[in-house]
Image: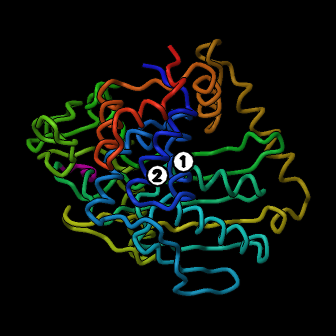
Amino acid sequence: MLIRAEPLERLLTAVFEAAGCPPDEARRVTHYLTLATLTGHDSHGVIRTQRYVEWIRDGWVLPGQHVVSVLDSDAIAILDGCHGMGQTVGPEAAAIGIAKAKAAGVAVVALRNAGHLGRIGDFAEMAAAEGLVSLHFVNVFGSLLVAPYGGAERRFSTNPVAIGVPTEDGAPFILDMATALVAEGKVLVAHQGGKPVPVGALVSADGELTNDPRVLYGPDTPGQYPDPRRGSGAMRTFGEHKGSGLALACDLLAGCLAGSGITRRSEGRVHNGMLSIYLSPARFDTEHSFARDVRDYIAWVKSARPIDPAAGVLIPGDKERATAAQRRADGIPLPDDVWHSILYAASLVGLDRPRIDSLLEGAASA
């Protein structure tokens, strides 16, 4: 089905407010989930609605929380997210880093104990909009999903990395990727009837490379939301030893250095840690050439003869911007299982069908 963004946002805002989020937070969580889906990062988008509602219900994520300062200096901030909603504490941490980098030229922000932060590229985009370069390394405490290079047992989570570089034309370089071959949410999308993941994205407990989501989620159980803790297999890193090394680096930086912790088993509350570095080009640009060099080099890269002339050569961020424009115009595609999961989440928080229908007025796009 295709559904328009605005009615979907109305419904999700009502869902999260009914789940216990303050109204401004409900709107913010909805905004970031919808934005992720609009940009084609379906794995971090509205498909997460039921999981978030259940985490709130179970006390794993706490609505209405804000970052608390553990350490503060001119260029360093250590923040505790207090297990708050990632769409609140993540932007708060980014705003602190941006302000410090503007004042000091560079800032390092360590965020610990954050609820699921969602699409990490959001924070790189925040920094780029303020003219800053940023790098973000994320780990996940309490969640083991990914096997290391040469292994068939879980040792990492999907441990994303994001890097943002501003550009003159307002179309920044935004590299946002999981260190797994695919994000866990993409396996979830495949499990829920969406696009399959590549063969080799998963490995069974016996070491067989596969793309069967049941390796991660275990046997299907009617009425039960897919839980990656139930499977006996694992996801795999991208680029074999290269992705495995980068995943380990995320745990060492965001878990050990930033103090969010590392995990040896999947149980209990899950939280994110993030180590972010913000750089002001104005302080580094002694030759006053940064903006021009970025513009010219990106243009030269994109001038390469394309394999597919219709697709052209893309840099990180281009596909997301094009997908968002298309989905805003045509509607957001949602597999049936995802749509039913959203409706189920609405019922969990007490929204009845007449209320849901009123919120979704004008939702159908096709």
SS category of the residue bearing label 1: helix
Residue at (66, 66) in percent of width and height: 95
The residue tagged 2 is 118
Tell me the quarter of the picture where residue 357 sits: top left
Tell me the quarter of the picture where residue 248 sits: bottom left
Question: Would residue 105 be found to the left or right of residue 206 on screen?
Answer: right
Query: Which span is picked out in magenta?
Result: 146-151
Toward the viewer: 319 or 154? Answer: 319
Mark 1 burial class by Cα count in 10 Å: few <14, some 14-19, many 20+:
many
Q: Are marks 1 and 2 in contact (CB under 8 Å)?
A: yes
Tell me the quarter of the image containing the N terminus.
Answer: top left
Residue at (11, 46) in percent of width and height: 232
The vertical placement of 61 against 323, above or below, is below
The vertical placement of 6 against 255, above or below, is above
Residue type for callout 2: Gly
Question: Would residue 192 be found to the left or right of residue 100 on screen?
Answer: left
Mark 2 burial class by Cα count in 10 Å: few <14, some 14-19, many 20+:
many
SS category of the residue bearing label 2: loop
Number of residue marks: 2
The residue tagged 1 is 32
Residue type for callout 1: Tyr
The vertical placement of 187 against 140, above or below, is above
Residue 264 visible? The answer is yes
